[in-house]
Amino acid sequence: MYSVFFNNSYRFCSNYAPQLELLQKASLNITHAGLNTTLESLSYGVPMVAIPITDDQPGVAARIAWTGVGEVVKSSLSANNLRESITRVLKERSYKQNAIQLQEAIRRTEGVNRAVDIIE
């Protein structure tokens, strides 16, 4: 069991978030640019705003920007530049269109079927 409380219609706090269920309804994912979250977002065609911290995250975030599926907020994070990135990604259609193109490419790879073939 998990608890959720809403402090308005746009934000909520929870001790558990079913990420894949949320991505099905999301217009945007604000992420640290971990590879799993990035691939899950792309699997649902969800553009991103990335705030990388360490390890592989800066490299993954650079690819988010390079492919045009989102923006990266640099280490000079502020409420203002985060808001600007969120606004751009939500308003400029190219981010969503690019995310959908990668979603379709992911589906065409049939990764699950290939994994089953390898295991068998």
Image (cartoon, rainbow, N blue to C red):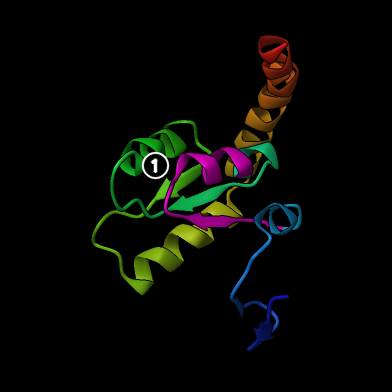
Q: Residue at x 57, y 55 (%)?
A: 29
Q: Is residue 113 left or right of residue 53?
A: right
Q: Residue extending furthest left?
A: 76
Q: Position of residue 56 (x, y in %)?
A: 34, 38
The amino acid at mark 1 is Ala
Of 89 and 107, nearer the camera is: 107
Q: Position of residue 104 (x, y in %)?
A: 72, 27
Dividing the image into 4 quarters, which one contains the N terminus? Answer: bottom right
Q: Is residue 84 left or right of residue 24?
A: left
The part of the image, by quadrant, that contains residue 78 is bottom left
Q: Is residue 14 left or right of residue 32?
A: right
Q: Residue at x 53, y 41 (%)?
A: 36
Q: Secondary structure at mark 1?
A: helix
Q: Is residue 31 magenta?
A: yes
Q: Residue at x 47, y 53 (%)?
A: 49
Dividing the image into 4 quarters, which one contains the C terminus? Answer: top right
Q: Residue extending furthest bottom?
A: 7
Residue bounds of the magenta highlight: 26-40
The part of the image, by quadrant, that contains residue 79 is bottom left
Q: Position of residue 45 (x, y in %)?
A: 68, 41
| Other residues around mark 1 within 10 Å, as few (<14) / some (14–19) / many (≥20) | many
Q: Residue extending furthest front?
A: 120
Q: Which residue is mark 1?
A: 61
**Count of marks placed on residues:** 1
Q: Is residue 100 magenta?
A: no
